[in-house]
């Protein structure tokens, strides 16, 4: 048994959210620069130039890459031999979010009672926390500030098993096509296939935490990612929807076995400002 | 290629703008999101005067991040325009001439743009740090109780934008996609 103090978790979460909001990860920046080289559309190239320049201004001035500093999504992979002391783990995470958004001049976008009052909670809490118990004695924290424009384009389809691979491809490509210019393309397409309805949706979101463009370790899944990316980039939406070749930087897919009657497919789009950071404690 | 334009937009500016044009705007922009739009439309429906005269003006759909010490404003990129679609035709009737946001507008808005001779432009979403550099002044001019959604008056210099919908029915989102579609 290894002990991790809740205060350490708070510090880590606060630091990760600030860093994620100011500095685009190197992998994402490299993918955007590659997209800039490959894009044929002049308007698309101009949009990519602005996005790349924006990243260097944000990092240099320590101001958020995007004014939408997101819902604070946090993934916790907790080793089963880890004990958290000095407070409740989720409270520690939320304290980290509170601190990052206050000290970091990040926009607080969470509202209470979304169906009625919609009153701002004032500190961007609560975080949306996903917890996984894993072997070992480490605690891995991944933060993903998720912007509203892209999140609002998420989709879930409970397909018939007979629709098969083609059904999956069509569902994902259609989701990107219908989202059009709204999710701030070039996007990263998160896909979850299998499990149950909520499992598929959770996998689609978790898939976005992968290093951009890194293929699935499963060969068949990796081939499907590649095929869907190819199809998505034939849609013509292009950077910011101005028309062009690069509508998506990558497709990341996670899968899980499903019931004999089911083929759940979920899509979660990540805008080009793909801000995620992780640390292992 | 890039046109420099002084705000407010003139009739002639509007006639000359075509979907796909890239522009640099200088002058006054008003900032409003859905909550402020709802209030403005409610005021108009009650026959009240608006907190600022929209006639001839351009509204930027944006909710900035807080200004760090020593800065005029935080990150200041566009938000999704579709959320304003329900209110836009009413403001166009009141004389609004330009809007800046991101993402496709409803058919109703596109028709109203032609009818009222107004334009819809997009700024690059997720480029809020870059755009903040073009803002020289920012003040709250209405609905301060809305906090980050209050109406702001900005003074901008060379604010970069792209014309999406012009008065001739041109639509960059539709045309761009058509041009590069291989499916």
Image (cartoon, coloured by chain):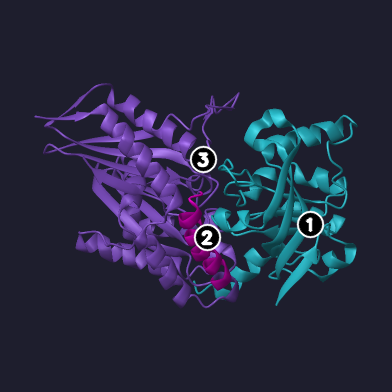
Chain colours: A purple, B cyan
Residue, disc 1: B27
Chain assignment, label 1: B
Quadrant of the rendered structure where residue A137 is? Answer: top left
Image position, residue A162 (x, y; %): 32, 53
Image position, residue B145 (x, y; %): 69, 28
- Residue in the picture at 72% in, 60% down: B157
Marks 1 and 2, how far apart at CA? 22 Å
Q: Residues within 10 Å of mark 2 (few under 14, many from 20)?
A: many
Marks 3 and 1, how far apart at CA? 27 Å
> Residues at badges 1 and 2 in contact (C-beta under 8 Å)?
no
> Residues at badges 2 and 3 in contact (C-beta under 8 Å)?
no
Quadrant of the rendered structure where residue B166 is? Answer: bottom right
Q: Nearer the viewer, residue B23 or A149?
A: B23
- Range of magenta residues: A45-63
Image position, residue A121 (x, y; %): 52, 27
Q: Is residue A204 left or right of residue A82?
A: right
């Amino acid at each position: 048994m290894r002990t991790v103090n809740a205060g350490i978790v708070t510090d880590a979460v606060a630091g990760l959210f600030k860093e994620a909001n100011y500095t685009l990860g190197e992998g994402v920046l490299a993918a955007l620069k590659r997209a800039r080289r490959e894009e044929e559309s002049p308007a698309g190239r101009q949009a990519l130039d602005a996005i790349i320049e924006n990243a260097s201004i944000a990092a240099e001035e320590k101001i958020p890459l995007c004014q939408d500093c997101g819902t604070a999504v946090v993934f916790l992979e907790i080793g089963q031999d880890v004990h958290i002391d000095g407070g409740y783990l989720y409270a520690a995470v939320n304290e980290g979010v509170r601190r990052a958004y206050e000290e970091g001049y990040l926009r607080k976008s969470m509202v209470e009672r979304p169906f009625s009052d919609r009153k701002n909670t004032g500190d961007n809490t609560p975080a949306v926390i996903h917890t996984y118990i894993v072997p070992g004695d480490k605690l891995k924290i991944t933060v993903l500030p998720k912007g509203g424009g892209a999140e609002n384009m998420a989709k879930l389809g409970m397909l018939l098993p007979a629709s098969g691979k083609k059904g999956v491809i069509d569902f994902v490509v259609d989701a990107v096509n219908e989202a059009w210019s709204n999710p701030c393309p070039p996007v990263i397409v998160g896909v979850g296939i299998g499990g149950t309805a909520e499992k598929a949706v959770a996998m689609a979101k978790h898939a976005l935490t992968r290093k951009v463009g890194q293929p699935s370790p499963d060969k068949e899944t990796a081939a499907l990612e590649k095929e869907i990316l190819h199809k998505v980039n034939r849609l013509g939406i292009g950077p910011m929807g101005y028309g062009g070749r690069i509508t998506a930087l990558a497709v990341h897919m996670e899968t899980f076995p499903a019931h004999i009657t089911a083929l759940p497919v979920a899509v979660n789009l990540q805008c080009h400002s793909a801000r995620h950071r992780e640390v292992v404690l | 290629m890039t046109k420099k334009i002084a705000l407010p937009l003139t009739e002639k500016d509007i006639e000359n703008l075509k979907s796909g044009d890239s522009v640099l705007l200088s002058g006054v922009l008003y900032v409003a999101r859905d909550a402020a739009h709802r209030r403005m439309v409610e005021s108009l429906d009650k026959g009240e005067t608006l907190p600022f005269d929209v006639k001839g003006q351009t509204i930027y759909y944006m909710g900035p991040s807080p200004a760090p010490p020593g800065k005029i404003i935080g990150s200041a990129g566009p938000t999704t325009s579709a959320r304003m679609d329900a209110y836009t035709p009413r403001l166009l009737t009141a004389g609004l001439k330009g809007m800046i946001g991101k993402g496709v507008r409803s058919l109703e808005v596109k028709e109203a743009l032609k009818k009222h001779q107004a334009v819809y432009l997009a700024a690059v979403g997720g480029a809020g740090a870059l755009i903040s550099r073009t803002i020289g002044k920012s003040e709250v001019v209405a609905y301060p109780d809305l906090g980050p959604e209050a109406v702001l008056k900005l003074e901008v210099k060379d604010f970069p934008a792209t014309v999406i919908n012009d008065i001739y029915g041109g639509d960059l989102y539709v045309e761009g996609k058509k041009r590069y579609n291989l499916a």
